[in-house]
């Protein structure tokens, strides 16, 4: 379980296709530079909201295997060396608690549909440091179905409150200056694809209602 509170920003050191591992040979291997101390093999780390298992601890970071299922549900195959990513250690390892809980499963890819507030676009250009960035995200239907005003949505691993639902496939969020400064959200341009995950409780409710029908 992850809180959606980013504990560090890391950098992609390498992305390579995985081979020679049977069923998982279509996956990827990610190398991540991370400022964590005491990281252990087998530990879970959310990388832009998607839960990955640490396979090897290397100097200054770790490597993780992205299986085919995760690869197909995320944007990892599009990542390149040098990309900055939001990180959160699982199980409270180095985190401060709080947040609103996310499964770390990666609900799908969304796109920044535009932004406003403080003269900002969908990225971090904006106005002064005290501006709140309001942004509309275009999200998959499965994510939109579990979104409600004042509910929560996780964007690249960052738990955010939903301001409004301005369209059938849109979710509006507001990113405060602190979040922009301590995550990668302030760097995103309009149209950039991101990982999104709908409210975890909402997903369970939808599943239960579907089962009853």
Image: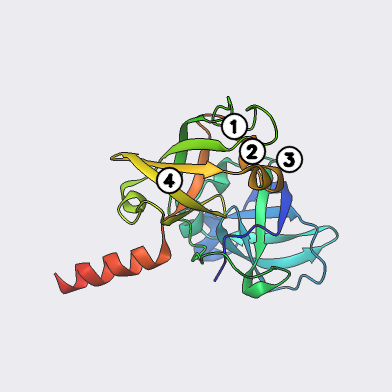
Question: Looking at the image, which is closer to me, 18 or 142?
Answer: 142
Nearer to the camera, 5 or 76 = 5
Answer above or below: position of 18 versus 79.
below
Q: Which mark is residue 186?
A: 2
Is 84 left or right of 170, judged from the image as shown?
Answer: right
- Residue drawn at point x = 60 percent, y = 35 percent: 188
Res 213 → quadrant: bottom left
Which mark sits nearer the N-terminus, 1 or 4?
A: 1
Residue furthest left in the image? 213
Type of colouring: rainbow
Numbered disc 1: secondary structure: loop
Task: Label 3, secondary structure: give it.
Answer: loop
Distance in Å between CA atoms under marks 4 and 2 = 18 Å
Q: Earlier in the sequence, mark 1 or mark 2?
A: 1
Q: Which mark is in front, 1 or 3?
A: 1
Distance between mark 1 and mark 4 Cα atoms:
18 Å
Q: Residues within 10 Å of mark 2 (few under 14, many from 20)?
A: many
Looking at the image, tell me whether mark 2 or mark 3 is earlier in sequence order: 3
Q: Which residue is mark 1?
A: 123
Which numbered circle lies on residue 163?
Answer: 4
x%, y% of residue 198?
41, 56
Task: Give how far apart the Cα atoms at labels 2 and 3 are.
Answer: 17 Å
Few, some or many residues within 10 Å of mark 4 (<14, 14–19, 20+):
some
**Frontmost residue, 206 versus 74:** 206
């Amino acid at each position: 379980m992850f809180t959606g509170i980013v504990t560090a920003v890391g950098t992609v050191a390498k992305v390579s296709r995985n081979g020679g591992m049977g069923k998982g040979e279509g996956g990827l291997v990610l190398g991540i530079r991370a400022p964590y101390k005491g990281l252990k093999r087998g530990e879970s780390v959310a990388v832009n909201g998607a839960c990955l298992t640490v396979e090897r601890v290397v100097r200054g970071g770790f490597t993780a295997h992205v299986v085919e299922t995760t690869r197909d549900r995320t944007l990892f195959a599009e990542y390149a060396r040098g990309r900055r990513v939001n990180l959160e250690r699982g199980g409270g390892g180095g985190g401060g608690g709080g947040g609103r809980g996310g499964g770390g499963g990666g609900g799908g890819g969304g796109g920044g549909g535009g932004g406003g507030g403080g003269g900002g676009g969908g990225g971090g250009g904006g106005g002064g440091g005290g501006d709140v960035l309001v942004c509309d995200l275009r999200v998959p239907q499965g994510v939109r179905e579990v979104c409600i005003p004042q509910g929560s949505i996780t964007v690249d691993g960052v738990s955010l409150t939903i301001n409004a639902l301005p369209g059938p496939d849109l979710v509006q969020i507001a990113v405060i200056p602190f979040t922009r400064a301590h995550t990668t959200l302030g760097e995103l341009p309009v149209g950039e694809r991101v990982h999104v995950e709908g409210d975890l409780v909402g997903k369970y409710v939808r599943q239960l209602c579907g089962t009853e029908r």
